[in-house]
Image (cartoon, coloured by chain):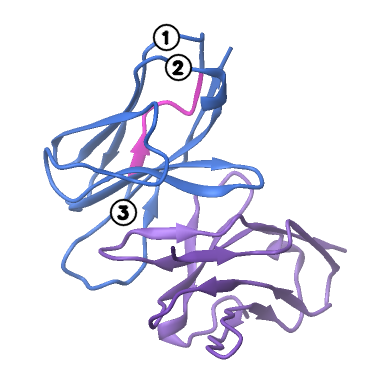
Chain colours: A blue, B purple
Amino acid sequence: DVKVTQSSRYLVKRTGEKVFLECVQDMDHENMFWYRQDPGLGLRLIYFSYDVKMKEKGDIPEGYSVSREKKERFSLILESASTNQTSMYLCASTPAGTGDTGELFFGEGSRLTVL
Amino acid sequence: AQRVTQPEKLLSVFKGAPVELKCNYSYSGSPELFWYVQYSRQRLQLLLRHISRESIKGFTADLNKGETSFHLKKPFAQEEDSAMYYCASILIFQKLVFGTGTRLLVSP
């Protein structure tokens, strides 16, 4: 089974703190994604990556950055956390070269609360 | 911009009743559409894709290009179907755009 692991299930941070959300996948997938999930807004894409050291902005990249130093790891960084970044963050991965199958493999999510 | 719309935030039905979760899309080409499901305390996962024309857990979804819809249907709802359902469309290279989601609640 594909396993996408998000290191922190629950985090509580203060406004202005730097926050790291880590995601690791064990199936050698090329593509990795960060979404945030909010009630009434669904899933919105923050950043994605098709390869090591490669990143692309999604629909809501403001206030976020990412790092992909190794193929299996995709980190989401909040340089200075704000209360409007309180949300559930979902990491996902999928292999390249299989056509547009549409199947993303998701982690369990990281629920971030910014006070 | 490509968009997926789910007009209902909550759909509440009784066990055994038919279910239809609505999804409309805006896309000028040939869309690739999917339904994802998230059960309580579980990961978001793919339920079905329109290109496969499959039935999963009794659910089906037909692409209607005339109405630009991809509604999810099940003739007889079960309590274990209670979950959050997201309609999604693919852009390029596995990049998906999701709808706002519909929570299905099936009561006994």
Q: Compared with residue A56, is residue B56 higher up or lower down, i.e. above or below?
A: below
| Chain for disc number 2 | A
Say what secondary structure mark 2 lies in: loop
Percent coordinates x, y for residue A100 in the rendering: 29, 71
Q: Which mark is residue A81?
A: 2
Q: Find the magenta span and give its range.
A: A4-11
Residue in view at x 39 percent, y 26 percent = A63
Percent coordinates x, y for residue B97 in the rendering: 44, 59
Q: Which mark is residue A2?
A: 3
Crowding at mark 2 (Cα within 10 Å: few <14, some 14-19, many 20+): many
| Frontmost residue, A37 versus A5 | A37
Q: In terms of sequence position, does the residue under pointer 1 or pointer 2 come before the other? A: 1
Residue in view at x 51 percent, y 72 percent = B26
Pointer 1 residue: A17
| Chain for disc number 1 | A
Whether residue A10 is in magenta: the answer is yes
Residue A74, picture quadrant: top left
Residue A87, picture quadrant: top right
| Chain for disc number 3 | A
Q: Compared with residue A61, is residue A79 higher up or lower down, i.e. above or below?
A: above
Percent coordinates x, y for residue A32 in the rendering: 27, 47
| Frontmost residue, B93 versus A61 | A61
Q: Are marks 1 and 2 in contact (CB under 8 Å)?
A: yes
